[in-house]
Image: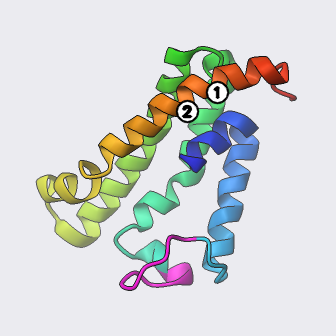
Amino acid sequence: MAVLLTGALLGSRLGLAAQVAYLAAGMLGAQVFAPSAILPPGAARLLGPTGGFLMVYPLAAFVTGWLAERGWDRRYLSSALAMVAGLAVIYTGGALWHMATVTHSFGATLATSVLPFAPFDVAKIVIVAAILPQAWRLLGGRAE
């Protein structure tokens, strides 16, 4: 959700830049990636089974931000759709990477890397999409 909010709040270019900075910090050893006893730390995390998800964060933030810059973050439904578009980028990149490096099976990748997380991600989008347009109204709009 932080990736999608980064794009929606900062816009396409700054959202992308923020996610590149996040990945760079993690690659340099900052403890920004989710803790894991089995996944490698630092730059090696990008080569592990979740690397595809991480590597597309900048693109997902860009897509969500690009839509937000066009007003998609001003109403509930369009705000949710902008975040769903960003989430689709994350799931696509992550699933393709996972399938290529771990399972070599679309069904297994879907069952282990997408479906267990989708209900929670959709629930977060439902909540954030309800808050985001109200926050912009309260704050008086985006500062560009």
Q: Residue at x 25, y 52 (%)?
A: 116
Q: How many C-alpha atoms fall within 10 Å of the one at disc 2: few (<14), some, or many (≥20)? A: some
Classify residue 75 as left or right of residue 92.
right
Q: How many marks?
A: 2
Dominant secondary structure of the residues highlighted in magenta in the image: loop
- Which residue is denoted by mark 1 in the rendering? 132
Q: Residue at x 55, y 71 (%)?
A: 33
Taking the magenta stretch, the answer to whether it contains residue 38 is: yes
- Does 134 appear above or below 102? above
26 or 129, nearer to the observer: 129
Q: Position of residue 93 (x, y in %)?
A: 39, 52
Q: Which residues are magenta?
A: 33-44
Q: Residue at x 41, y 61 (%)?
A: 52
77 or 108, nearer to the observer: 77
Q: Amino acid at mark 1?
A: Leu
Q: Amino acid at mark 2?
A: Val
- Does 28 appear above or below 76? below
- The picture quadrant where one finds residue 70 is top right
Q: Residue at x 69, y 45 (%)?
A: 15
Task: Report how far apart the C-alphas of labels 1 and 2 lie in the structure.
Answer: 6 Å
- Which residue is denoted by mark 2 in the rendering? 128
Q: Position of residue 11 (x, y in %)?
A: 72, 35
Q: How many C-alpha atoms fall within 10 Å of the one at disc 1: few (<14), some, or many (≥20)? A: many
Q: Are marks 1 and 2 in contact (CB under 8 Å)?
A: yes
Classify mark 2: helix, strand or loop.
helix
